Each structure stands twice: as C-alpha cells, then as structure tokens.
Amino acid sequence: MQKKRKEKSLVMTNRMYLFLIPALTMFVIFWVIPLLMLFRYSITNFNGINQNYDYVGFKNFITLWKENIIGISIKNTVTYTVILVFVSNVAGLALAMALNAKIRMKGFYRTAAYLPTLFSAIVIGFIWTYVYMPSNGLIATLMNQVGMDGSKFNILAGFKSALYGITIVDIWKNIGTAMIIYLAGLQTIDESMLEAGQIDGCTGFQLMRYVKLPLISATITINVILSVIAGLKAFDYVFIMTNGGPGKSTNTLMYTIYKIAFTDQMLGKSAALSVIAFIVIIAITIVMLFFMNKREVEL
Amino acid sequence: MKKLLSLILSLVLVVSVLSGCSSGKDNSDGNSASNGGASGSGEKTVITFMCSGTQATEGEDFETQTLKKMVEAKFPNVTLEVTKLPDDQYYTSLKTKLATGEAPDIMWVQPRNAGANAVYALAKAGYLADLSDLNAAKTVPGTGDFNYDGKVYAIPCGVQFLGAYYNKDMFEANGIEVPTDWDSFLAACETLKNAGIQPIVMGDKDAYVMQFGLYQLAANVVYPKNAEYDNQLADGTTKFTDKDTWDRVLSMYSELYEKGYIEKGSLGIGASQAIQQFIDGQAAMTFDGTFNAAAIKASGAADFERGYFPLPGNAAGGTTYVAGAPGAGPAVYAESKNAELCKQILEYWFDAESDLCKAFQNNPRFITSYEGAPVDPLFNDFIDAYSKGNSFYWCNQAWPAGTENEMEALFGEHIGGQGTTIQQITQGMQNKFEELYTE
Amino acid sequence: MTKRNKSNIIIHILLCLYTVVTLAPLVIVLSSSFRSIGNMTSHIKLFSEFKLDSYIAAFTRMNFPVVFMNSVLTTFGSVIVVVLIASMAAYPIARIKNKRSRFLYYFFIAGLVIPSQMVIIPIAQMFNNLGISYNRFTPMIMFITCSLPFSTFLFTGFMGSVPISIEEAAYIDGSSLFRRYFGIVFPLLKPATVSVIITQGIWIWNDYFFPMVFVSRSSQFSLPVAMIQFLGDRENPAQWNVLFASCILCALPLVVLFLVFQKQFVNGVAAGAVKG
C-alpha cells in the first residue's frame, strides 16, 4: 500500500528523473555503447588495427571453447576472487576489531594498514617479486634465519602456488580499505547493546555472531561487493608479476582478454571472451546481490 | 520555470567541464594544422613522436632529449613532442591511437612481424607512409626487414644481437675457453657446475627471456639447413613439428635445465633479478641481448671482466651463426598532416654527415654500421659474423605476433615439470601459428 | 595483571606483527629510492646508501611540476564532476520506488565490474566519432565515466538514510526541486561525498592507463604516466631506483593528505559505506 502511494507522490515526481541525465548520458555514450560495439566485434576477425575485417560468426567462441581458454581463465578468476573475498574480509574484520578495542597507538596501526592502498600497483607488484624471490628474497632470507630451508621457497615459480602468490599481494594492498570500513561499522554499535548481551550471558562468540555481526551487516555487504569486484577484475598483479605464467597458470579472465587483444592481436577473439566474461560477471553479481539482500534482512 | 532553469544550469556546468577539455586543445591544434609545413609565421608545428623504451636516468636520453633538441635546432618551426613508454604500454597506446586517427606523426615500428607494432601489420593496414624515396631508405643497411610489398616503411636504428654474457674471471679460473660448438658449451657448463659455480642464470619469470637462448639455437639448427623455413611455414611446406627443427632446438635448450646448468627455480626470478645475480658473481653466464649491455656492465657485488659470445648451437667444426637483426626504427604515419616534414626529419636523422646522426652513432644504445661509428669491443665477434652473412634474424620477426608467447608458456610448463613434452610444444606452436597467420 | 591488560598485550603483539608485514615492502621501496641510480644490489639490504640522486633524476626527468599540476587538475576536476552527477543520478533512483528506478540501479551496477582494458578500443573509436581531441583533460571523461557506477551505488544507498520528511516539509514551503536537492539533500550526503572523493580520488590519481592512451604530448602527461617511463621492457632495463623515487613522489601527496585529514578520511570512508 505504502509503495503505491509513493508512486503518485507529489514530492517525488517523475521530473526528478531529469537529474539522471548527465550521468546517464555519459554512462551510455562512453561505457554502454562501446561495450555493445565490443560485442559486435566478437563475431568478427578484427585485429584491432586493420579496419577491413570479416564477420566470422561464432568461430571465435568455438576456438575459445576448444582451446579451453574459457575454463582455465574462469577457474583462475574464481579462485582468486574467493580467496580475496574470504581472506580480506576475515582479516579486515579481525583487524578492525582489534583496533576498535581501547588500545594505545591506534592511529599508527590504522595509518600503517591503510598506507599500501595509496601506492601504485606497478611498484607494489615489482617489490613483491623481491619479497618472493627464491634464495635471497625477503621471505627466503627470513626462513634461512630461523633455520628453515629458504632455497625451497619459490612461490611464483610453482604452477599451483603462483596464483595464491599474486592473490596475497592484492589482499595485502586492499586489506586497509576493508579494515577501515569495518572499523566504522563497529563504531556505530551501541555499547549498551553489547552490555545487554553480556548480561544475558552471551559468550564472546555468541556476542559476535548474534549481536555484532547483524549490526554491521550493511558494512559486510559493501566490503564483500568491493572485494568481489576487485577479484573479478584481477589484472594488475598478473600483468606485472607473472604475465600469466608460469605456463598459463595465472591467466585470469581480464589478463587473457588483454593478452589476446594486444599480444595475439585478435581483438575479435578477445571480444568474444569479453562477452563470456561479461555474462559470468553479471551472473555472479546478480546471485551475490540477491543473496546479500536476503541475508541482510534475515540477520 | 525556475526549476527548469536551474536544472539547465547544472547541465551546462557539466557539459562545459567536458567540452572545456576539447576547446583547450582546439586552439593549439588548430594552429598547428593551419600552419602545417608552412614557414614564416611565428607559430610552431607540433610533430609527435612515440617510441618504446625507458627514459635514461643518467646522461642525455637520446629520443626525449638529444633528438628533440637537435631537430628543433635544425627545424626552427618544429616542436618535437617525444613520448617514450615501456613496450607493452606502448603497444596498447599505439593501437588505441591508431584506432582513432590520433596516431603520432612518427612512430616506432619493429621489423617484419615482430610485436604488436610490426611493420608488416601496420603497412598492410595502410597506416604507414612509403619512405622508399628517402635517401636513408637507400643508404641505411637493414631496410630489407622493413620492406613490405616492395616499399620501405621504416628506417632501422642499427642492429641488435643475442648472445651469452659470461664472467671472464670465472672462465679463466676454471681453465675454460670460450666454447665454439654445442658439446664444448655443455662441457664448459659441466666444469663450472663441478666447481660449485652456477653456470647460467635466467629470469624465466619474465618468460620472454627464453627467446634469448632459443633463437640463438634456432639460428644454428633450423635456418642453416633451410633459410626459407619460416616462409614455408606459411604455405605449409614446413611445420614446427618437422623432425630435427624446433624439436631439436627445444630439447637442446631443455637439456640445460635438466642438467641444472640453468638455475633451478628460474621461473621465480625476474629478468632484472637474473642480470643482478650475474653481475653479483652468483652465476657464470646469462643469455641476453646487446640492448641490455648497459645493465650487464653496471657494477655489482663482484668485480670481474665481462665477455660476450654467441651461443654455439653448431656441431664441432661447424660455423656458429649469430642471432642478429636490425633494431626497431621510426616510421611515418600515413595520415599525418606533416608527413613531408617528418620525412625531412628522418633524412636529417640518418644522414651520415649530420650532427644528429653523429650523436646517434655515438649513443652506446645503438650499434650502427656507419663508417667510423664507435662499436663496443664486446660485440666485435658478432659484427664480424654479421658482416660475413653468418647470421639469421630473430625467429619471432617472421612469425605472427603471439606465436612466441605460446612457445614460452608451453616451454615454461615443460621445464616446470608439468609433463608437457617437446612434441606438445611444437604442436602448440604450430596450432598457434595456423590460428594467427593471415593472408 | 587484569584480564583486559592481558588481552590488550596480545592485541598489541598481533597488530605489531601485522604492521611489520604491511610496512616491510614499503620500507624496501623507501630504502631503495635513496640509493644511487645504478645500485641494483639486492633491495633487501636496507638503507645501504643515503643519496638523493634518484629523487633528483625522477624530479627533473618526469618534469615533476608540470605533470604534478596535470594530475592535480584532472583528479580534482574528475572527482568534483563525479560527486555532482553521481549524487544527482542517485536522487531519483533512491527516492522514486518503482521498477524503472530499480532497473536503472542495476544498470549502473552492471558497470562496476567491467575493466577498462576490455573496452578501450571501442571507447577510443567513440571518441573519434564524437571528434573529441586529445589533451590533458581528455582522460577525465573516462575517469568520470568509470567512477559513476560505484559512486551512484554509494549515493543511492546513503540517500536511504536521509529522511524524506525534511523534503516533504520543504515541498510544502514551496521549494523548487532544484533548491530541495542542492539546498537540503546534497549537504546531508556529506559523509557519502567524502567517501566517494576518497575511493575514487585514489584510483584516479594512480591511474596511468587513460592518460597514457588519451594524451599525446608528454607535457600533458599525468604523474603516473611520467612514472612508467622508467619502467623497463624486454629490451630496456628498468631504472628501478628512480622508479621507486618517482613512486614515492607520486604517493607522497596522498600520504600527506591522509595524515592531515586522517580523521575525516577514516570517518568518511566509513560513514559513506556503512549506511550504504
């Protein structure tokens, strides 16, 4: 009933849609139409340079399927995203809780955690290759000092471990943002609610699960969304640190799209992969938003 | 009414911010367009030049400083705007700019099919101006690699080689002579290894460095037997899977990993880290190109004399062929409003008598073949072989861009213990070639 | 010792560990930026040298004052426009509750996850069709466009916490739609605005991709593009120490802003997001 009344609201008139015009115009012209143009290229053999191209039907899609590019890149991207979402949220929340306690030097810890966010990904990627370097990298050196065999440590060379290696860098860089958002969420919790919980005999865990988490559910939503986006877009550290290697073990969707377009010079094929990526991403987003909205109400 | 007015106002605000971008440029650009090539008026013509590379941090940078300064001195009406980007970024940027007709007047292109800025691809799409009439196109050696359909489209900046940099002190201490055939090379590695020295370090995390060794072997294994090998790939007469061609090259190179001559875990080391290990005296050799000589010569933790020899892929008693090719060079954008002026600039640049050309020859980054141009003694053997004709181009220059990446990825799997066989690598290269090859 | 003190000590130890992990790579960057230009010995050997050569080279060869101004202008310009048009767009989407609004909401959200590398060539062709020429301000178009989805998303969420009753009162007082929005609603969006400025400002400041593609002259480059000129490639070794110095120069303005406005910064990111 209430909804209906609002539709006819005198205050919220349809004229308000005029406010949308600037944003919508830009978004459509510089984002939606180019995306549609890209979709059109997916059925051509356009190489990105020569304007004389032919329509080749679904050949690009078939090649992508046959070469198993779709499978590998989706699997890598999803792995990357799941780890990123899980670790950066759990760690970010834990960090925020620690910083929410009444302790000294809060400002210092907070600044330290947020600093990596401000640096350019190129330099971050390079410096982490020194952290990971076998034999005399930072981690290997530390391992040697505590009596472990540092020469065995070579995370970026491992076909199974390289993907985790670059995910860690992304987590390291983005944990600060998650932490700050959680911190803010925690600060909005009314002390009296917690006291009430304690009086009711809640254990620390119960307090967490049934009082704190529900109260910061909006914060969780936004953090999860942010990290899912970051994960699905994973490109920078693959590009800088591994170039998809060793072998093809760190080819994420976005890196593969880039590589096919700019190295193999097959914009048509890369556009076909973009179409697939787009569908996958939209599907994930819809599922996630649906789930998130539902859960938020439940909690 | 008031509401509408205010809304329009806010729209105007947004639009003006946006169009402010273009109007700012219109002034300057309009001027350069109307005065394109004209002389006399005080306005300057802006010529844009985009190339790939890294800004020099010590001394003068050739493209962004020397070239700019001298061209502007010679052509007082010209402002030369030089942009230098690392190659991946350069490719992306150039491609996007070509797609919009905002391409630079002078651009950096690579010989034959090499890279995303390959002269063949760009000439075929009609983006490059014909430079055949220039003096430079006739006098500068190496323009053959920039010849598409009988026309020259770019002027090469000297020549480049691939080789093995080695630690002379280590070789001497272990009584090793510079090897001249494959077996003696393996023997040298074995001696070093037995002496507890890592024979070779490679930064295979940056997979392109695999080319540095492989192409040298191909120059000795594949091309001497059939110089037309790559051309025949196109019509299917030859295939990567043919026996005793690439299977041999790859298994020879793979042997270096199997025997531990190339550092274990090389897949986790970056190219610059590998160079650093070499100059720190942690390994006796590294395969690299003449283009990285400056980094190789930088002082590190160890003090030793550097040497450079072509990796001998030949049998004992045979000739060692070097992998040498003309370097990338400038080409002129066909649609440039100032194409004629750009050609004059190139003439000036490559005219052996001009000051600019002298500065160019004297820049250690380029190995030019001008009479009297200084050459690093490190490269003497290579230049000898090259001038005798004992050299072959770099393989990827004859392949559609992307074939070499497939090779690197599969070879990475091979040495990384993923069970990829040599046969699967050559098959993969063949498949990729067929997928990418057009025409 | 009380229980509280004990747990505080554990928290301190964990936080210290975490801080070390966070800062270690950055300390390497800082220490290497103070090396002489050619010194590429293991970057793990911290502060083996203390020279300003790399900074001087970075400063002069990047043409720092010029590219810095370009960066400041484009970042500020973009952020202002984004705040303005994204908040305006969020207004009807949040206030009018019908299918059309919900569709528009998801329409914008769909733009969240599309990376720019994917569509850069069609975008460039679009620029060409519209006759947009290239100069230092051209990348702003894409900065703004790419920032719209997230900003609109954030503003729409936050708008829900702005009570409608205030607006209804203003309506009764005879305020125009425009006055109602800019006079009453927009000022109340301040936390979300701060949040948008911070999150979008950081990526715009650090982005080299759009300025690299949409700027033709080196004098119109932004800081990150000038910085990647030191990044090496296959045939040219990187100038790492100078790159580190230029990276510090590039991040320094953000770090200073962060330290100065730390409180607003934290509360801003937070408040905008929490209610979003």
Image: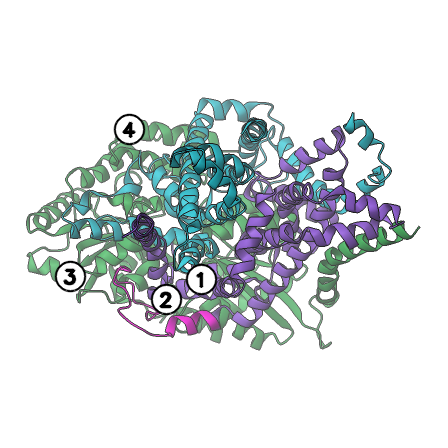
Chain colours: A cyan, B green, C purple
Mark with earlier residue (3, 4): 3
Please report, as a chain letter, where disc 4 is located.
Answer: B
Residues at marks 1 and 2, common chain?
Answer: yes
SS category of the residue bearing label 3: helix
Q: Tell me the crowding category of disc 3: few under 14, some 14 to 19, or many 20 or more residues within 10 angstroms, Cα based.
A: some
Q: Which residues are magenta?
A: C33-59
Residue situated furthest front in the rendering: A199
How far is disc 4 from disc 1 in space, using C-alphas?
A: 40 Å
What's the amino acid at mark 4? Answer: Thr
Q: Which residue is mark 1?
A: C247
Q: Which residue is mark 2?
A: C33
Residue positioned 22% across, 37% down in the render: B254
Percent coordinates x, y for residue A249 in the rendering: 36, 34
Q: Are marks 1 and 2 in contact (CB under 8 Å)?
A: yes
- Residue A170 at least partly seen: no
Q: Are marks 3 and 4 in contact (CB under 8 Å)?
A: no
How far is disc 1 from disc 2 in space, using C-alphas?
A: 9 Å
Percent coordinates x, y for residue B367 in the rendering: 36, 63
How far is disc 3 from disc 4 in space, using C-alphas?
A: 36 Å
Q: Is residue C41 magenta?
A: yes
Q: Tell me the crowding category of disc 1: few under 14, some 14 to 19, or many 20 or more residues within 10 angstroms, Cα based.
A: many
Q: Which residue is mark 3?
A: B168
How far is disc 2 from disc 4 in space, using C-alphas?
A: 42 Å
